[in-house]
Image: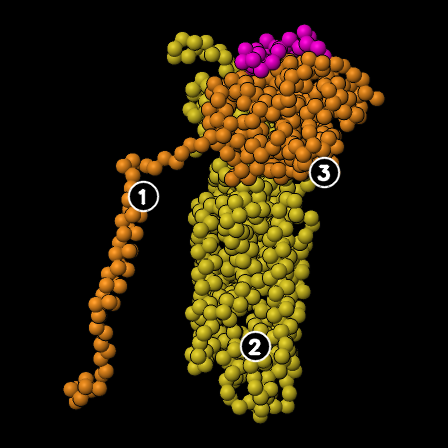
Chain colours: A yellow, B orange
Amino acid sequence: MGGLRGVRRIYAGCSLALFAFFLWSAEFERLKGYAVGLFLQLDPLTALSGFLTSQTLYKGLAFSLLILIPTLFLGRFFCSWICPLGILNQGLSHLFNRRRAIESWEENRYRPLYRIKYYLLVALLIFALLGALQIGLLDPIAFIYRSFALSVLPVLDQLTSGGFFAQATVFHGGVLISLILLAILLANRFITRFWCRALCPLGALLGLLSQWSILRIRRDVERCNHCKQCLRACQGAADPDGQLRVTECHLCMNCIEACGSRALHYGLAGEKSSIGKPLDLNRRRVVETSLAALVAVPMTKGSLSARSTSTPEVIRPPGSLPESRFLARCIKCGLCMRVCPTNVLQPALLEAGFEGLWTPILMNSVGYCEHHCVLCGQVCPTAAIRPLSVAEKVGAAPFTQPVRLGTAFFDRGRCLPWAMDVACIVCEEACPTSPKAIWYETASVTSRDGRKVTLKRPFVQPELCIGCGVCENKCPVADLAAIRVSSVGESRSKDNRMLLNQQS
Amino acid sequence: MAWERASEIVEKLEPLVGRREFLRRVAGLSGVAVGVAAGGYLAFSDQPVRQPEVRALRFKDFRVPPDALHPVLAVARGQRVEAMARGAIDKLGGVGRFIQKGDRVLLKPNVGWDRQPEQAANTGPELVEAMVRICREAGAKSVWVTDVSLNDPKRCFARSGIEAATVNAGGSVRLPGREDFIDTDMGGKVLKVWPVSRFFHEVDKVINLPIVKHHSLSGCTLAMKNWYGVIGGQRNRLHQAIHDSIVDLAAAVRPTLTVMDATRVLKRNGPTGGNPADVVREETLIAALDEVALDSFCLQFLDLTPEAVPFLALAEARGLGMVAWRELNIAQIQVG
């Protein structure tokens, strides 16, 4: 008794395995050209909203058409066959389900609550249309990548003392991401596939597209004896026992296998097939949501953020686009943070403003930007971080300028040779540019007890500094380094500059 | 009505406890009580904080017995690194003097930086490959190659070519993770107890494979400075007393043998380098049993004098070797 459900289970297993493989390969030694962001590129919602904000369908995002076009004919097959979050929810709902038949009928019946996802979709798309990309908060693929990259895998790293990396990774506010993931997974205990039924904006988009689908679950009204076994098995709340709501059907095929009288099949309508129900949407609510979103965008733009004002701690990865274009592309998937070998890339909380939540910033207390590493731009699915060659990053021929992330500044009140007459210049040792951006002057000073001390006192030459932050990371003043990088001088910005001779 | 309904409720009764059952229960509860009391007694401490016993290891002495028949410094010049290494080691008495069958051998090249071989910031992969092969041929049971890198260790070992060289020649790379450091008593002037990469405690022989490089604070990075790569912890504080630290490290780790890579020498902008224009080919390898004499010998590549490098005199005063290498018996050979 394999049937279509059995085929679906094989596909789902392969999709999950592929997802796990991509996450495993997102590492310096294993990243051998694998399309680690493939699921993000297959996602029509990131493609559509990215298209609305950037007016381009960047490279691999064209793969999303492979999902979008078949959905028009086949229905929401993506949700149960390909989406890693959908498959996880499906599996957990199956495990959690210990309901009696009468409880299942109640629980699996369609509820108006499930309209929320359409309103969320409308709001997020209107945001995108006005240039504010917040799809990454709720898009299931970005959600599952982020949750695994910044919460599940670090936990595994901690348990295996280092695991994939030389040092176990840690992430800024990682526990928040963990709690949200746990809440979404645990919700399956109370409502089967709660995320997919009620919240998922991608599911809503695919639901809208599937309303004209030719192939769908069909119920033969003469064979059906109304035993409701199909409703008991339904994971989508699509009412297969009555008039099917095709927009809610995830094509898990459970109902077909559950039916004892062979009244259900997937395909074209037969002579005695029941009609379906149209999409259940309240037009008034759609208009209200649209108006709210229209007002909300200028409101977010009116709040202080890295987009409106240069912000010292918003240091973006090498190759990042200028802030407003960066925010118009970044879907907060966390792949760049996963692949970063030094763990310097961290999910911002409110550093870059509300709209910059979970976008990547460099925290040099954790790591630093490895001079010859360009992995973040290589894995970014939307080119919010442009793919750079090593030559372009370091400014080797034919390039004339390196990519600068910011500029380092000495805090002379904390610097050992400046403030305490103690030898140090670790920053100068670690500085990777050639010639080094940190140089020193040899000074002879008299210490408190009258000894003559000869010291090397360091300086930054801003024209040479690339803002990689290795000086800050290696500074022996452990808690708040005596040399710190801020974003000024970053190549990507025309405004966040200080020197006249540094013009783009 | 209410009275009638109450009469239908079947009340369940607690069974009576007999003498035997009573004694059994009392014995059981007493056992638990004694266990709790014993636990309390064992856990009791009159100190506010329980200090774990500090058990610091010390380094083994990896040296082989001195031998008046052979020189302590053998300089090989030429183009073929493996032949130069073999020639220089033969002059010191042959590899059989240093490696016995079944030895676990640890090689410590300088792999501090995410740089390629041409940039001469790390020991050349050719020397590492040659040394792994020589040790394997001498019957070493295992040959490990390790360092505590400053940049991301995986990138350092991959891009320096040292990982591939090691694997090619039949050795294995050991990258220390966070858990791989063991407190070790360095017994030094400024270095007391420091976390040390555990691999140094798990081998029979240690061979130092440094490279000649410029360094702004100490003047140069040579054999003794290469021991920075055995310790973890907050070692960036060592710069505050760099010469004493170098001597402390060299006094703590006494290697079986040192083979200095002076084929490519980073003359400026060290120790990271980056620009091939700062690298000069000197095409020299030096095998040595005296790290002080070796470091002193190598100053010629960086146009330095022993007076400019205070750690040499400090090391000599500590009895680690001789600065005046010209007074020693030195073998010099030309290979190919």
What residue would you read off at disc 2? A254
Nearest to viewer (mark 1 / mark 3): 1
Query: Which of B55/A499 is in front?
Result: B55
Query: Which of A321/A501 is in front?
Result: A321
Nearest to viewer (mark 2 / mark 3): 3
Q: Residue at x 64, y 78 (%)?
A: A3
User: Which type of secondary structure does the marked residue at label 2 adopt?
Assistant: helix
Q: Is residue B134 above or below residue A62?
A: above
Same chain for marks 1 and 2? no
Looking at the rendering, the stretch of residues picked out in magenta corresponds to B303-330
Query: Which of A231/B247 is in front?
Result: B247
Q: Residue at x 69, y 29 (%)?
A: B100
Q: Is residue A239 above or below residue A454?
A: below
Q: Identity of the amino acid at label 1? A: Ala
Determine if residue A494 is in view: no
User: Which type of secondary structure does the marked residue at label 1 adopt?
Assistant: helix
Q: Quadrant of residue A251?
A: bottom right
Give the quarter of the figure containing the C terminus of chain A: top right
Q: Identity of the amino acid at label 3? A: Gly
What residue would you read off at disc 3? B170
Q: Position of residue A261 (x, y in %)?
A: 58, 88
Chain of the residue under label 2: A
Whichever of callouts 1 and 3 sits on the residue coming sooner in the sequence is 1
